[in-house]
Amino acid sequence: MLALLKTFREILGRWWSEFTLQTRLMAAATLAVSLIMSGLTFWAVNTIQQDARVNDTRFGRDLGLLLAANVAPQIAENNLTEVARFSHRFYSSTSSVRYMIYADEDGRIFFGIPFSESEVHNSLSIRRRIQLPEDYAKNSDLPMVRQHVTPDGEVTDVFVPLTHEGNYLGVLAIGINPNPTVVASSNLTRDVTIAVFISIWVMVILGAVFNALTITQPIKELLTGVKNIAAGNFKQRIDLPLGGELGELISSFNEMAERLERYEEQNIEELTAEKAKLETLVSTIADGAVLLDTTLNVILVNPTARRIFGWDGHTLVGENVLHHLPTAVTLELTRPLYQIAGGETAAEREGEEFRITLTEPTLRTVRILLTRVFDQYRESIKGIAMTVQDITREVELNEAKSQFISNVSHELRTPLFNIKSFIETLHEYGEDLSEVERQEFLETANRETDRLTRLVNDVLDLSRLETSCRIYHFEPVDIAGPVEQTLRTYQLNARDKGIELVQEISPKLPPVLGHYDLLLQVFDNLVGNALKFTESGGRVVIRAYPLEANPNPNHPDEIPQVRVEISDTGIGIDWEDQENIFDRFFRVENRVHTLEGTGLGLSIVRNIVEKHHSRVYLVSEVGIGTTFWFNLDVCTEKDQSIEQPSEDHPNREGLPLQRSKG
């Protein structure tokens, strides 16, 4: 049984998949309309039947009350003969009454039409009675009505109490036949509705079958043919014996396929060459691209190449490219272009690469790749594709990388040379040196080792900050925390040098959105530099205060900020040095003093502040002092409710955040 059901479902599924979307929608619409109309019809039939029941109930109740009023006096006088005569006469005069039954106070039937009690009673006689509610005699003011179904149809039962002069005498039960006209009308309406519903669906099924046989199959054949034509199979034909519009469509399709086949045979070589050119250009469209023919005339040029060579607003198609290229490019590419166009280059070399520095329209470095475009048989050259890549940024990065490596090597060489010199001296002449000299040499080697350690740590920190793509987890930070920790770190150092180290933090300062350890490193570097460049008796101050809000109608959601300042009364920085103070390995002591440092501390500060979406500024005057300052966004409720991408604390990677003396 299950296998049969599964087979039937598969057949039904395949049959349904044969229909188009339009046919399915029409079937669904037909089903919806037929269900709605059938529902309305059955609702109307039920309404009519309900009204008929109400009318039958009302008629039976009135009829029962009338009969009860006429027979109650006779029953009270026990004149059952007159009751029987009257009831027979009434029952014979109407066809609406199915039966009439009289029962006494206890529900025992003593008379009924069309049946009554036997006149002879014996021990086998069965006493019939009407089962009424126990309290019916007490609540016998109104008739009781019910319906029951018989083989001959539904009958309405009406129970009317028999009372005379306030005395309860029994009950009169009357059965009322349903209205034959209403019954016939309801049955007819129901039968017509079922017949219409079946007829509609028979027509829909027949239409679907007709559609599948006469319309869907030709359309599928046409769809297959169009796909084959799109795939390049121009030999595709459709052979279906159909007339009318579908026949004309199939005939037009076959004619189109024949023309395409003839066109392919005549122009296959030209089409393939054009396709190869377009594919080459599209494959290099991300960079500048220029497509040339074998005479070096421009066929296509993309907007990137126009921007690089300054060709905006110029009509280049059909003109020799060498007449419009910048001078440096023309000098470099004239000979290779003619060699490639003439097929003089080696067969295995399909392209050549050149790196050229342009001075116009702007200073930039470009990489130009010349690629030959062959025909479909790769026997002859049909053109040249020139790809232009702007590598200015790449060159700058390589130069910066080389400069960085050179600077690191230079900075590492000095402490390593000093360490090696003192250790060699101790090793060779240790016995000839005094204890004081040996101690001095070891202290010098130790200081140089510390300097080397600071340099390596600063290089690692700076490299991690500049090259890492990680996203730090910013959270609410009370700026007083890292400030107080920094003051505790440098308090002894400041006291030894006789420098006053204080903080001026505004009361009730709101928390800022930042990274605690990174901010601590900023304070560490800036305060360390301030102490190093401040003479005895000077003063170093860390300030933090909220910026006054300036309502901006163009930016109503502007976030409030806190300004942080690190000021000192040190030697100051010249104006010419302020522009380069944040560069790597730039040290002010090279110009104004001889204090040692790595030259990376302020570069680390700049990168950390930029990680906090801000910038660090300075105000300085030689002999008066220097102030570094930056702004931090106040942490709002929205920032606290949004979970940002988190990352581990930098220390968890084994790369400690060291103090850097810039």
Image: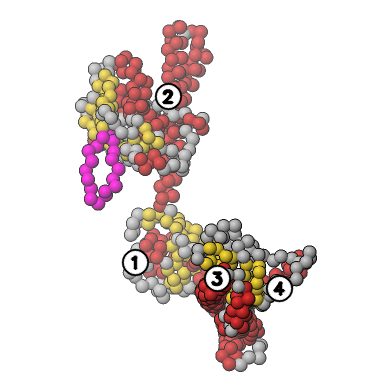
Task: Give the CA distance from mark 4 to mark 1.
Answer: 65 Å
**Quadrant location of the C terminus?**
top left
Q: Which residue is mark 4?
A: 11
Mark 4 and mark 2 lie on one chain; the one further toward the N terminus is: 4
Residue 450 visible in the snapshot: yes
Task: Give the CA distance from mark 4 to mark 2.
Answer: 85 Å
Q: Which residue is mark 2?
A: 451
* Label 4–label 3 contact, CB within 8 A: no
Mark 4 and mark 1 lie on one chain; the one further toward the N terminus is: 4
Residue 34 relative to residue 463: left or right: right
Which residue type does callout 3 highlight? Ala
Q: Main secondary structure of the magenta part?
A: loop
Residue interval drawn in magenta: 546-564
Foreground pick, 103 / 212: 103
Mark 3 and mark 1 lie on one chain; the one further toward the N terminus is: 3
- Residue appearing at x 48%, y 73% in the figure: 293
Foreground pick, 531 / 174: 174
Residue 220 relative to residue 404: left or right: right
Which residue type does callout 1 highlight? Asp
Q: Is residue 361 above or below residue 324?
A: above
- Image x and y of residue 489, in percent: 37, 21
Residue 560 is one of the magenta-drawn residues: yes
Q: Which residue is mark 3?
A: 72
Mark 4 and mark 3 lie on one chain; the one further toward the N terminus is: 4
Q: Which residue is mark 1?
A: 312
